[in-house]
């Protein structure tokens, strides 16, 4: 099994699929492992060598109990994986917290990023829009089953849930230890890339579901307006997991953008 080692000696598990000459790194959301991309990844495999990985704290990667968790630090972890693969430059597609990581990667390692896709993500506070209190309350219920149901309904539309019983790969890594779960939550909450966004030079596509209240849709135009030359596309009717439920729209949209360069 392939592992990369970071400068602080953390082992990161990653997988490589696909057969294209170009490399596409796919970055998963908060507290989720590489299976986040199991549904969407096959759309890209015929055209790219796709790289998925487990953030530190999830899956088969190390789970240090320390203060090394941040979106900026996760971007450095991606660099370690690219170095382990001997890849100088890759296209990058990050969703949710993975999109926050991708922002730092493109801003601070511009030479390593070809084309950039930021999905259902945010510049962070204080400039981004936070989810409202009712959403926070639904996710913070003591009844674990009720909280999971609330998360499921934030990710997918009722019609999709009714016809797709799962399993779902976007509701968090069930084997994640509590210290790492807290660290991921804090890393995502502390994200603030506002001042760094204008430094992004990679051609950028911002994608968001029009009905996303988990990460409010209004964050998408904020990002697109802050990144020079960025394109914006909202997918009508989609919630947070647009890349999964609306794969038939999102897959070709993102693929067309990536192959345009």
Image (cartoon, rainbow, N blue to C red):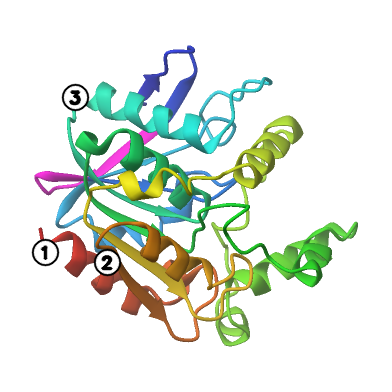
* Residue at horizontal 33 percent and vertical 57 percent from the top: 227
- The residue to which callout 2 is attached is 254
The kind of secondary structure the magenta stretch mainly shows is strand
- Local secondary structure at mark 3: loop
Answer yes or no: is residue 39 visible.
no
Q: Quadrant of residue 166?
A: bottom right
Marked residue nearer the N-terminal end (3 or 1): 3
Q: Residues within 10 Å of mark 3 (few under 14, many from 20)?
A: few
Marked residue nearer the N-terminal end (1 or 2): 2
Highlighted range, magenta: 14-23
Residue 260: numbered disc: 1
103 lies above or below 122: above
- The residue to which callout 3 is attached is 86
* Residue at horizontal 18 percent and vertical 36 percent from the top: 89
Q: Quadrant of the N terminus?
A: top left
| Mark 1 → mark 2, Cα distance in angstroms | 10 Å
143 lies above or below 62: below
30 lies above or below 43: above
Residue 129: numbered disc: none
- Local secondary structure at mark 1: loop
| Mark 3 → mark 2, Cα distance in angstroms | 25 Å
Q: Residues within 10 Å of mark 2 (few under 14, many from 20)?
A: many
The image shows residue 140 at horizontal and vertical percentages of: 83, 58
């Amino acid at each position: 099994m392939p592992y990369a080692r970071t400068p602080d000696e953390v082992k990161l598990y990653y997988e490589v699929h696909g057969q294209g000459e170009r490399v596409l790194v796919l970055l998963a959301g908060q507290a989720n492992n590489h299976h986040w991309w199991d549904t969407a990844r096959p759309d890209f495999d015929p055209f790219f060598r796709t790289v998925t990985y487990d953030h530190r704290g999830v899956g088969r990667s190390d789970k240090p109990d320390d203060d090394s968790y941040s979106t900026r630090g996760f971007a450095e972890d991606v660099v370690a994986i690219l170095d382990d693969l001997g890849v100088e430059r890759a296209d990058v597609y990050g969703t949710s917290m993975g999109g926050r990581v991708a922002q730092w990667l493109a801003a601070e390692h511009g030479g390593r990023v070809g084309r950039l896709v930021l999905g259902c993500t945010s510049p962070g506070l204080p400039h981004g829009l936070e989810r409202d209190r009712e959403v926070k309350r639904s996710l913070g219920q003591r009844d674990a089953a009720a909280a999971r149901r609330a998360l499921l309904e934030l990710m997918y539309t009722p019609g999709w849930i009714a016809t797709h019983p799962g399993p779902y790969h976007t509701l968090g890594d069930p084997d994640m230890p509590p210290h790492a779960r807290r660290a991921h939550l804090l890393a995502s909450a502390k994200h603030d890339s506002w001042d760094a966004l204008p430094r992004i030079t990679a051609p950028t596509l911002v994608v968001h579901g029009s009905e996303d209240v988990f990460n409010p849709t209004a964050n998408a135009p904020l990002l697109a307006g802050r990144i020079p030359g960025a394109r914006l596309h909202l997918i009508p009717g989609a919630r947070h997991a647009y890349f999964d439920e609306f794969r038939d729209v999102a897959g070709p949209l993102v693929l067309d953008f990536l192959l345009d360069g």
